[in-house]
């Protein structure tokens, strides 16, 4: 079973920054669009950002200009640089693979990494 391993979450003050990482099996990383999702209690999981194998990128309106997604093909790691964090960014963040054209999520989600933005 494919396993994504997310890390880098934590407690940060509003306006702070975090960088999340996701280790991805190479067979998946080399062939698929990769994406970050987040879910907070009582809310549906939402797409935060995605990056295709040709590095096309797409962001949720709520994070545009603050978050940056990137992928390291040598290490098979997906990153999410999060700047100017707001309390509403607090959530568990997950990575997964998806089809760019349909947004269909391809695999089971991992454990995620918790981000808490609070003073």
Image (cartoon, rainbow, N blue to C red):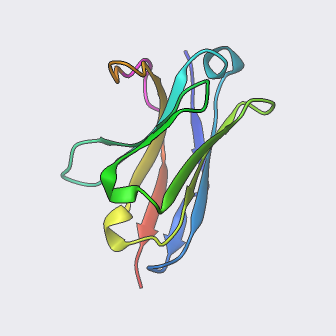
Q: Relative to residue 107, is residue 20 drawn left or right?
A: right
| Magenta segment boundaries in residue numbering | 105-111
Magenta residues, dominant SS class:
loop
**Residue at the extreme right of the image, as rendered:** 74
Q: Position of residue 6 (x, y in %)?
A: 57, 43
The answer to which of 55 and 36 lies nearer the viewer is: 55
Q: Position of residue 17 (x, y in %)?
A: 56, 70
**What residue lies at 58% left-to-right and 64% top-to-bottom?**
18
**What residue lies at 47% left-to-right and 63% top-to-bottom?**
66
**Residue at the extreme bottom of the image, as rendered:** 119
The answer to which of 57 and 31 lies nearer the viewer is: 57
Quarter of the figure that contains the N terminus: top right
Asked if the stretch drawn in magenta spans residue 107, the answer is yes
Quarter of the figure that contains the C terminus: bottom left
Asked if the stretch drawn in magenta spans residue 20, the answer is no
**Relative to 48, residue 102 above or below:** above
Q: Position of residue 58 (x, y in %)?
A: 43, 40
Tally of marks = 0
The answer to which of 114 and 35 lies nearer the viewer is: 35
Splitting the image into 4 quarters, where does residue 88 fall?
bottom left
Q: Relative to residue 77, is residue 52 drawn left or right?
A: left
**Relative to 90, residue 49 above or below:** above
Q: Position of residue 62 (x, y in %)?
A: 32, 57
**Relative to 2, residue 17 above or below:** below
């Amino acid at each position: 079973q494919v396993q994504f391993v997310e890390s880098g979450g934590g407690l940060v003050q509003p306006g702070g920054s975090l960088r999340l990482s996701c280790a991805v099996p190479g067979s998946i990383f080399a062939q698929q669009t990769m994406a970050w999702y987040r879910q907070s209690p009582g809310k549906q999981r939402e797409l935060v950002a995605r990056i295709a194998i040709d590095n096309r990128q797409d962001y949720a309106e709520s994070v545009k200009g603050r978050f940056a997604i990137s992928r390291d093909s040598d290490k098979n790691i997906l990153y999410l640089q999060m700047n100017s964090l707001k309390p509403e960014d607090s959530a568990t963040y997950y990575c997964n693979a998806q089809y760019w054209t349909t947004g269909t999520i391809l695999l089971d989600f991992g454990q995620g990494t918790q981000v808490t933005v609070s003073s």
